[in-house]
Amino acid sequence: MNATAEMIHAAAVPSIHLPILRDRIDTLNRKAVKLGKPALTLTVKGVESREVIIHREGRPGIKITAEYTLLEIAGDRPILAGWALAGVKTRMDNGEMMLREVPGVSIPVEYRGQSYDCEHCHLNRRRSELVIIHNIETGEWKQVGKSCLSDFLGGASVQEYLDYWAIYSHAIESANGEGEECGYRGGKDRECFDSALFLALTATAIRTMGWVSAAKAREICQSGGFAFPTYGAVCSALRNHSTDDKKLRRQLENDMDESDGADATAALVWARNLSPKDASGYLYNLGVAARQECVTMEIAGLMASAITAYKRAQESEAERKAREAMTNAAPVVRSHIGTVGKREVLTLTVKTLRTFDSDYGVRTLVRMEDPAGNVVVWWTGEAPEWAREGNQVKVKATVKAHDDYKGTPQTTITRASLA
């Protein structure tokens, strides 16, 4: 096997965790040496401070500043006979394939989806795993069954090829803290939860207790506190074994309302309809997870993120429609209003307030608009209670001047009060 250094994974870990990570990579490198393969390297790129909340039983949380180390883990991307490892596809319960890509590699979309065909033996049987490889000279891609891989590569031993990838994957998991959640630890027995109920309880947990990602839970734990990731709390409630599980289940069920069920249903439909061809890597895997018959521990963390991912997608779509509406809308033609020197009654909406220091003390500029979009400004000392952003008011004021600001007509008023 020859190799080229291409696999680079960036991570940020609490600095207090760095010695543990170094020890684990040293252990993995000893395995690499036994395989006769290059060692993984860990490079520190810098440090940064992050604010962390330590949660205490029965008492308010404490904010502290924790140091995080920014690092990169680099490994040599395995190459045999000109073919580089690009990723591994694993069959899920419903027949779809979960995809694990080599860092820095984007596998063509045609290799996603429910395809078991080995492009060497051309047998389309339900394989549990398929290996995606890429020819670094010709640019060709292939999907090959594990049992056919050695034959495809000219009889070369492929176990070391895959073992080295497993070593690198384990290093990434160690850097990301996967499998080391504090609070919840799953057992070895295979468990399966109803998808709709899982997401409904997740929506309730997020609404009443806030979203706690696996990464956030690790931060809290590594700072001396204790926390469940949201998915772990929901799994415990659904498991309903211990006294604490049953108490949490009752709490979530009592707190659940119709909006949680609606959010869960909408998020599940949205996730199941994510296009394998158009979605990003994360959204692709979320779609695969959502289309399973139930939620297993292997995909529970991914599935729990569906609620927040769906809401982000809805917000992005609303913003896109708003921008589109603004682009297509006819331009607003603004003009001056009222008669200079005359007392007028104006219906206005308060848009912004800005304060400035002057020789006469602090002055506030209140910017307002009438229903036609015409701009009205008022300079005052301390703005009254009614002059708050978003308020719609009927104001009695004297028109002081008809001015222009950056080409936009604006009417300046004085002695303003509620009509």
Image (tube, rainbow, N blue to C red):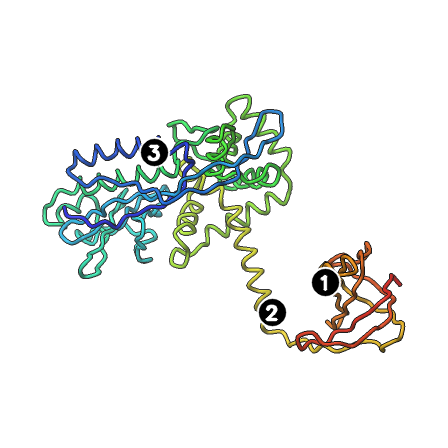
Q: Position of residue 80 (x, y in %)?
A: 15, 49
Task: Give the labeled residue for mark 3.
Answer: 21
Outermost residue to the top = 243
Q: Left or right: where does residue 375 sit relative to residue 243?
A: right
User: In front of the other: label 2 or label 1?
Assistant: 1
Q: Disc 1 to disc 3, how far (Cα)?
A: 52 Å
User: In front of the other: label 3 or label 2?
Assistant: 3
Q: Position of residue 86 (x, y in %)?
A: 26, 51
Q: Position of residue 205 (x, y in %)?
A: 57, 37
Total count of labels: 3
- Kindly check if marks 3 and 2 are in contact, taking CB atoms under 8 A apart as contact: no
Q: Nearest the camera: 122 or 371?
A: 371
Q: Identify the amino acid type marked 3.
A: Leu
Q: Secondary structure at mark 1?
A: strand
Counting residues from the start of the chain, the first of labels 3 and 2 encountered is 3
Task: Give the labeled residue for mark 2.
Answer: 325
Task: Give the labeled residue for mark 1.
Answer: 351
Q: Is residue 263 above or below residue 20?
A: below
Outermost residue to the front = 359
